[in-house]
Image (tube, rainbow, N blue to C red):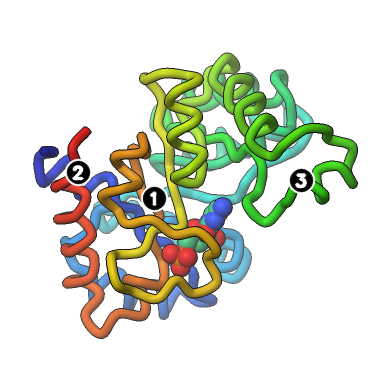
Amino acid sequence: MLAQSQSKDRLIVALDVPSARQARQIVQSIGDAATTFKVGKQLFTAEGPQVVRDLVSSGRKVFLDLKFHDIPNTVAGAVRSAAELGVTMLTVHASGGSKMLKAGADAAAQSAAKPMVLAVTVLTSLSEADLQEIGVPGTVLSQVLRLGALARAAGCGGLVASAHEARELRRELGEGFAIVTPGVRPAGSAAGDQARVVTPRDAIAAGATHLVVGRPILEAPDPAQAAAAIVADIESAVV
Ligand code: C5P
């Protein structure tokens, strides 16, 4: 059993909305049922860094999901800017290679806020055929494990991975790094466009440390209650 405060920090609510106004409404309706919110490309592109500053100054933690992928110097600069906004977690693409990953991880470690750098391995929208098309041989899983090991060796604090990949990554890479898992659905809820879904409890049992949940909370009649139910399910996980 996990302590309730610990469990709450493991839930990341995805603010997948087009405006700061809608984001504020959701954050308010959730109240203190969640601590951490994901700002992604849609909201950030529409509203800019102020949306992050507002969340941070209201005492929330922010996961900035912009999936940086560029030359090492540019990624290091972007990570420094994210750290200055006060984000807790941010994403980079592992396929940017070791030098880029290390530049990002080092920039985070040298900042005051020291955000956790999470690497995205293979986008879950890509199939084996898609990988072949871009010149990557082998299975999706072998590429996930390869890039996961690379990110870890470069000093990243964790990975973004599906629950299935989480189990394999834990088996191959062991403990001591975060695994952030989307595609989570409370038992009995609609899957939406997620092809493979797991319950919060099962994702934690598979080795995930954090869960990203959007629509099951955003579209719930009572978002605070939906978030609290997910936290309770996380808490019940045997780890
Ligand atoms: O609404 P839902 O719970 O499906 O939202 C999941 C969040 O996680 C979205 O922000 C989505 O972009 C993100 N995500 C995902 N699958 C991945 C990586 C990220 O659903 N493989």
Tally the numbered discs: 3
Name the residue located 70 percent from the left edge and 25 percent from the top edge: 100
Q: Given the image, on which type of amino acid does mark 2 rest?
A: Ala
Mark 1 residue crowding within 10 angstroms, few (<14) / some (14–19) / many (20+): many
Position in image of residue 230 (x %, y %) = 23, 60
Position in image of residue 86 (x %, y %) = 40, 42
Q: Nearer the viewer, mark 1 or mark 2?
A: 2
Q: Which mark is residue 62?
A: 1
Q: Which mark is residue 237?
A: 2
Q: Given the image, on which type of amino acid does mark 3 rest?
A: Glu
Q: Is residue 233 left or right of residue 49?
A: left
Mark 3 residue crowding within 10 angstroms, few (<14) / some (14–19) / many (20+): some
Q: Is residue 225 left or right of residue 56?
A: left
Position in image of residue 10 (x %, y %) = 28, 45
Q: Nearer the viewer, mark 1 or mark 3?
A: 3
CA–CA distance between discs 1 and 2? 24 Å
Name the residue located 28 percent from the left edge and 66 percent from the top edge: 187
Q: Which mark is residue 128?
A: 3
